[in-house]
Image (cartoon, grey):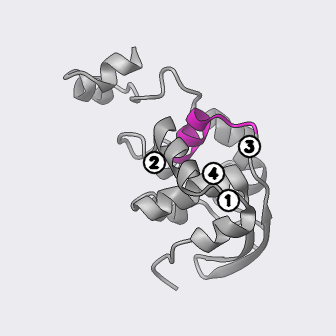
């Protein structure tokens, strides 16, 4: 049914009525977040000061550009190693690759986070095909190479 919604003139009506396009036949981003991300980044994605960064601003900011979306995909699929600054705070550690997630699950969780955990309605930021394309563009697939992809965020 979601393919019908995505590919028809009824997409706008379905979205207005609360049907999230692309999510009816894909794993829910909220479930992936709760099972994988919330352990470190907290149930509200606010992070743990000094240990794990907040995901709020950076996911939304990175989701607005092709380079940022590639970076997000690679962080989830290959992990991240190196110092990052988020909201003026520095974090130095390792995020492990979230192995075992399908391309649909990666797309779902990143779209869920980019929508402020479902609070900001809109079409998904990423589809499974976008995840596959990003991975194909960055075949080296290491946490260190992903760190080199990190775009600069505006602000302090």
- x, y percentage for residue 156? 52, 86
Q: Which of marks 4 and 2 is nearer the N terminus?
A: 4
What quarter of the picture does the N terminus occupy? top left
Work out whether residue 3 can be spotted: yes
Pair 4/1: label in front:
1
3D distance between C-alphas at marks 3 and 2: 18 Å
**Which secondary structure lies at badge 3?**
helix
Q: Mark 4 sits on what residue?
A: 44
- Element assignment for label 2: loop
Q: Quadrant of residue 106?
A: top right
What residue sits right under mark 1 in the picture?
140
Q: Earlier in the sequence, mark 3 or mark 2?
A: 3
Q: Distance between the residues labelled 4 and 1?
A: 32 Å
Cα distance between the residues tagged 4 and 2: 13 Å
Region of the chain picked out in magenta, as a range: 100-111
Depicted 26 relative to depicted 115: above or below: above
Kindly tell me whether residue 112 is visible in this rendering: no
- Give coordinates of residue 59: x percent, y percent: 52, 59
Q: Do the residues labelled 3 and 4 touch (CB within 8 Å)?
A: no
- Secondary structure beneath dot 1 equals loop
Earlier residue among tags 3 and 4? 3
Query: CB under 8 Å between callouts 4 and 2?
Result: no
């Amino acid at each position: 049914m979601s393919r019908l919604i995505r590919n028809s003139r009824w997409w706008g009506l379905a979205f207005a009525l609360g049907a999230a396009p692309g999510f009816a036949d894909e794993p829910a981003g909220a479930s992936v977040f709760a099972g994988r991300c919330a352990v470190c980044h907290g149930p509200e994605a606010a992070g743990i000061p000094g240990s794990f960064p907040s995901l709020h601003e950076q996911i939304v900011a990175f989701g607005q550009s092709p380079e940022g979306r590639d970076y997000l995909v690679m962080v989830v699929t290959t992990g991240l190693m190196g110092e990052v600054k988020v909201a003026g705070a520095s974090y130095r550690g390792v995020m492990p690759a979230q192995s075992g997630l399908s391309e649909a699950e990666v797309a779902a969780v990143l779209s869920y986070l980019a929508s402020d955990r479902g609070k900001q309605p809109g079409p998904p930021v990423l589809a499974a095909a976008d995840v596959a394309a990003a991975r194909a563009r960055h075949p080296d697939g290491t946490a260190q190479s992903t760190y080199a992809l990190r775009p600069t965020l505006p602000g302090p």
